[in-house]
Image: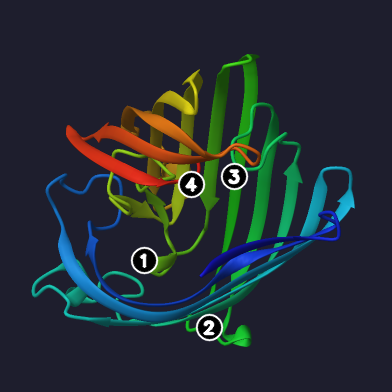
Amino acid sequence: LPFNLFLKNRQYQLYGEIGYNRYTYYFYGVGNNMPPAYEEKYGVEFPRLRLTALRKIKGPFFAGVRYAFDRFSLFDLAEGGELSSGRVPGSSGGTVSGLGVVFLADTRDYIFYPSRGLWSELVIYRDSPLTGSSFNYTRIAFDFSKYWSITKNDIIALNLYSLYANTDLPFFQMGLLGGARKMRGFYEGRYRDNNVALVQLEYRRHLFWLLGATVFGSAGQVAGRYHLFHHSNWRYTYGGGLRLMADKSQRVNLRVDLAIGNGQLLTYFTIGEAF
């Protein structure tokens, strides 16, 4: 159950997720150089609570706190796989319970389908035994999106994302490439590590009636430490899609995307834009 509440004319914002998950996922290893064909299944069960509370400071600027809780129990690990070997941090499961500070700037003209403005979030998050966690680390995440309206029907959207950690994170807290939002064209978690650098660019055009189309491209990489990022390690995806505006007043789109990464075509069908 994800939620996003705007209170008192957006003087306050409360968003997060409450959930319970028991599912089987694919694990593709840690690092930027795992063989493209490598994958192993694992099962995981966890309750989840994510809560961010922000207050407007001035104009488009907000600040607040974040709390995150997950209790991971792994099962059905692939025999002879990376997780069953115990070499991967977090492969024995454990509890994530930590606090962070959040700084947000938002000048978008629309929340769900912006045509101009920017959205930027900086999160400094700490997991510690003092807050009930099985782990001890700090991660800093920066997410930035900028939108330009070229004409009434043409929009350029740019997204930059970076995750920094100077220690090893449990694999389920590492930065990920892939999925419906961060580098479409890879399965979510196709590349993961303690640090991430990512750029995405998208051209969006209204066609006619409630229909629109997009083309996009992404470049990203992961690394065990920030100084290990290298120009030869960039991974690339690209694709295009169609949009059907389901709510004209709020500009909420149904989204269908086709994206290619590592020579594989993936399809995405969801609500709302990738960024």
> Which mark's residue is nearer the viewer, 4 or 2?
2
Residue extending furthest toward the left: 79
Where is mark 3, residue-wise? 143
Task: Give the mark, 1 or 2, whose residue is nearer the N terminus.
Answer: 2
**For residue 26, what is the image quadrant?**
bottom left
Give the amino acid at mark 4. Tyr
Q: Report which residue position mark 1 lands on.
A: 171
Q: CA distance from mark 1 to mark 2?
A: 15 Å
Circle nearer the viewer, 1 or 4 = 1
Identify the residue at image location x=80%, y=53%.
62
How far apart marks 3 and 2 lie (CA) works out to 25 Å
Tell whether label 2 touches label 3 (CB within 8 Å): no
Work out whether mark 4 precedes mark 2 in sequence or the reverse, and give the earlier one.
2
Q: What is the x, y in percent for residue 108? A: 71, 36
- Which comes before the other along the chain, label 3 or label 4? 3
Residue that carries the numbered disc 2 in the rendered image: 133
